[in-house]
Amino acid sequence: MPHALGVVAFGDSITNGAGEYQWGVPLQSWALWTARGLGLPYSPYAVDGATAADVVAEQLPAFEGTRAHPDARYDLGCIYIGTNDVRRPEWDPEQFAGELAAVHGALSPNCDRRLAVTLPLDLGRPRALAGVEQANAAIEAAAAAHGALLLDLREFGARNLMMADHVHPTALGQVAIAERALAVLAADGMRVRVRPSALVKYERGRWGRLRGDLGYCYRHLKVSARAALG
């Protein structure tokens, strides 16, 4: 019996995971860190700026059309989407729920497990308050209906884990999300080979801390001012 093909991931820039170094740690996708923690190959399909509709219309067809072994299954499918949906003026919770159902329906026959991720409540500036709650309700409902695991990031966020825009995780934020994902997967019986936090090394001197704090404060003030004026 052939082995499963590893981890496959869908979503937006948070799962695509490119960006600045943080104290010498490269910004890599939480899903990639999760795959490394499991000791499994990784296949990414996430695209910056994507919505749930884009996952259905573009990422799933790319997945179906480009994989080398169409009949093989994956150990894990990661689904983290909704950040761009809830921040749009045309946000439609019912449409979002239908798109999530389509994503889970397409991945269920192809993945031994699926991991769905809720959105942080402190999302964006200005905050997308009602939209985040509606999206999280839909994410939970779709996961329950299709037998997927759930990673709850509602309370996720801290100065060193989220960028000043309160949307994108920092390099260490991506590691922290992966740590939480692996805890969920381990509780469901998957074997964790290594913790992502054990794979990164960094040193923060006094000057480095001050420079990082000043840079963060400057960017945070810019984001807050733009939100207040907009």
Image (spheres, rainbow, N blue to C red):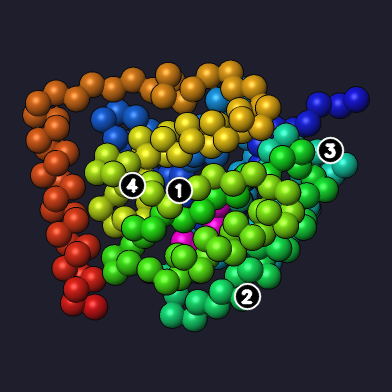
Write the residue at 66% across / 53% down: 143
Q: Residues within 10 Å of mark 1 (few under 14, many from 20)?
A: some
Q: CA distance from mark 2 to mark 4?
A: 28 Å
Which residue is the site of mark 3?
Answer: 72
Q: Residues within 10 Å of mark 3 (few under 14, many from 20)?
A: some
Q: Earlier in the sequence, mark 1 or mark 3?
A: 3
Q: CA distance from mark 1 to mark 2?
A: 22 Å
Element on which disc 1 rests: loop
Does 116 sit left or right of 203 as displayed? right
Picture coordinates of residue 79, whole percent (x, y): 61, 50
Write the residue at 38% across / 46% down: 156
Element on which disc 2 rests: helix
Q: Earlier in the sequence, mark 1 or mark 2?
A: 2
Q: CA distance from mark 1 to mark 4?
A: 8 Å
The circle drawn on residue 157 is 4
Write the residue at 42% across / 19% down: 198
For the C terminus, the image quarter is: bottom left
Which residue is the site of mark 2?
Answer: 95
Which residue is the site of mark 1?
Answer: 153
Element on which disc 3 rests: loop
Residue 46 visible to an observer of this rendering: no
Q: CA distance from mark 3 to mark 4?
A: 37 Å
Q: CA distance from mark 1 to mark 3?
A: 31 Å
